[in-house]
Each structure stands twice: as C-alpha cells, then as structure tokens.
Amino acid sequence: QVQLGESGGGLVQAGGSLRLSCVASGRTISTLSMGWFRQHPGKERESVAQITWSGAATNYADSVKGRFTISRDNAKNTVYLQMNSLNPDDTAVYYCAAAPAFRSYLSPASYNYWGQGTQVTVSS
C-alpha cells in the first residue's frame, strides 16, 4: 500500500505559477509510475501528466503541453507538477496517483493509488 499526499495548491492570478508536490508514504515509489490528474467542477477527472518509474518518459495532455512539467525524486519519494502560465481553465482539484510499473503509465485505468487532491484556483 502507498499513501499519497498532495500539497502546493492555492489561488493564483492568470499567468502565474504553482508547484504541486505529492509525497508518498508506506512504500517506495521507485517501482511505480506516477501521474497527475484533475477534476473540474461538474466534470469527470482527466489526465494531466504522467511519468514512468525511472523518469525516462513523460506524457502530457494537449491542454498543458509546454506549460506544465512533471518530475520525480525517488530518493524523496516525491513527485512534482510545475505549472506555469496558468489560466482560469486550469482551475480544478488536482490529484496525484500511482500505478505499478508493469501497467501502462499512459492509461488512467492503471492507477490504483490516489491522493485526496489539492485545489488550484486561477483568477482572471
């Protein structure tokens, strides 16, 4: 079992930046793919970014490419999401998730460990 805890959310003006962190406990994340997902009010959860267990490969939703960067520090059992050039459409609850390395890191269905989420609000 792995427990995930997100932090770093908050209120920011359009054009600003935030850095989300996800700290894992209970086991090492070094054999887990990690991902960030978000849920807009009244909508289904969607993929934002994923990273393989080694960090060698990443994947981004088209809506965040060039603005968001996912990274990981396995020694700190932590995954990050650097978010730049934020706009009001990025307002959502952001969730960290983990998937076993043998599953496809690209598929949301692979992720079976989830954090509680952190709210990101971007004002215009």
Image (spheres, rainbow, N blue to C red):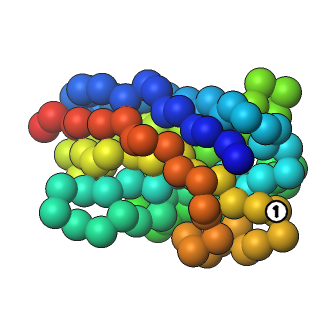
Quadrant of the rendered structure where residue 30 is? top right
Q: Residue at x 60, y 54 (%)?
A: 113
Q: Residues within 10 Å of mark 1 (few under 14, many from 20)?
A: some
Q: Residue at x 22, y 37 (%)?
A: 122
Total number of numbered labels? 1
| 15 and 54: which is toward the camera | 54
Compared with residue 94, is residue 65 higher up or lower down, i.e. above or below? below
Question: Residue extending furthest left?
Answer: 124
Q: Position of residue 15 (x, y in %)?
A: 30, 34
Compared with residue 55, is residue 14 higher up or lower down, i.e. above or below? above
Q: Position of residue 87 (x, y in %)?
A: 26, 44
Left or right: where does residue 107 sit relative to residue 75?
left
Three-letter amino acid code at the position of disc 1: Ala
Q: Position of residue 22 (x, y in %)?
A: 58, 34
Q: Position of residue 103 (x, y in %)?
A: 76, 72
Left or right: where does residue 121 sit relative to residue 83?
left
Does residue 58 appear in the picture of this structure?
A: no
Per the image, the residue denoted by label 1 is 101
Q: Residue at x 38, y 54 (%)?
A: 38
Does residue 56 appear in the picture of this structure?
A: yes
| 93 and 70: which is toward the camera | 93
Compared with residue 33, is residue 118 higher up or lower down, i.e. above or below? above
Image quadrant where one finds the C terminus: top left
